[in-house]
Image (cartoon, rainbow, N blue to C red):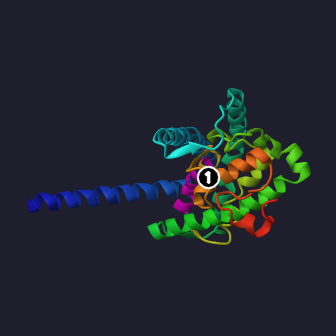
Amino acid sequence: MLEFKLKYVLNIKFLTNRKIKYLNSFFENFLYNYSYLTLYGLTFCYFLFLYFGVGSLFLYVCKCLEHKNILQKIIDKKVKQQQIYFEIKHTIKSIVIFGFSIIPVIYLIRVDLVELLPDTWQNIVLGLIVLTLWNEVHFYIVHRIMHQKFMMKHIHYIHHKSNIPTVYSVFSFHWIEALLLSTVPITIIPLIPFSIVAVMAYPLVSILLNFAGHCNYRFGNGSLMSWKLLGTHHNEHHSRGRKNYGFALNLLDKLFSKQNN
């Protein structure tokens, strides 16, 4: 019995070491050997998977939780199919832009202008937290710019075509807005070192928060001021076209938006 357990532990360690070596080999090739065209293609497919794959799963979970009375719809109206088609059409255009976001990051790594941290769990988790906080600031700044009269009339209006937000509206942008929003990593990694795994994993964290803000579902009736109002805050922004400019948190709105007016 002891011999069996020992073999089992050794096999687990062997498989784990093989996986680590495989991942290290993949990231080494990704960072230094893949062509920029290949990097673009991989990033483009990554965002497609996040949008269609993770998005569909997120919506399914929301509907299951609604059925169990854990979640409830914020605006209980049926979204027209034309809106969904519109959102998907503009999302594809945005993902075309997002595909380019990895190229300047990899370029800076290859010319040794960016320092990478070891891919430890501590570095990955800390990196995701820092990127989440930076994205909150970055998004707030870009979003306030988008609500200037010229930008709203010619660019940001596309995103606000979704009066009732859906999971399919998260990337429904004008290409200029998509370009500005895609600069989250490149505006911070020259200043702060990150694990490359944190940089690569952050779009997943970001889109999950984005889905939560656009899915038109919330916990409870939305009457209590808490983190549970994430969906309510952004839903109100879509329906009213003003206030609640933050991404997931409401802190910057409270600090700079004069009671969200």
Quadrant position of the N terminus in the picture: bottom left
Q: Residue at x 88, y 43 (%)?
A: 154
Depth check: 237 or 95 in front?
237
Depth check: 135 or 1 in front?
135
Q: Residue at x 84, y 45 (%)?
A: 155
SS state under label 1: loop
Q: Is residue 257 magenta?
A: no
Question: What secondary structure predominates along the stretch shown in magenta?
Answer: helix
Give left or right: position of 57 versus 215.
left
The answer to whether residue 50 shows anywhere in this view is no
Quadrant position of the C terminus in the picture: bottom right
The percent coordinates of residue 201 (x first, y second) are 54, 56
Q: Quadrant of residue 23?
A: bottom left
The percent coordinates of residue 139 (x first, y second) are 72, 58
Q: Quadrant of residue 217?
A: top right
Depth check: 188 or 117 in front?
188
Question: At label 1, which amino acid type do we have?
Answer: Gly
Q: Residues within 10 Å of mark 1 (few under 14, many from 20)?
A: some
Q: Which residue is mark 1?
A: 222
The percent coordinates of residue 222 (x first, y second) are 61, 52
- Position of residue 261 relative to residue 55, above or below, is below
Q: Is residue 200 magenta?
A: yes
Q: Residue at x 71, y 41 (%)?
A: 172
The percent coordinates of residue 61 (x first, y second) are 49, 42
Q: Residue at x 71, y 27 (%)?
A: 82
Give left or right: position of 91 versus 9.
right
The span shown in magenta is 195-211
Instruction: Spot the residue most to the left.
Output: 1
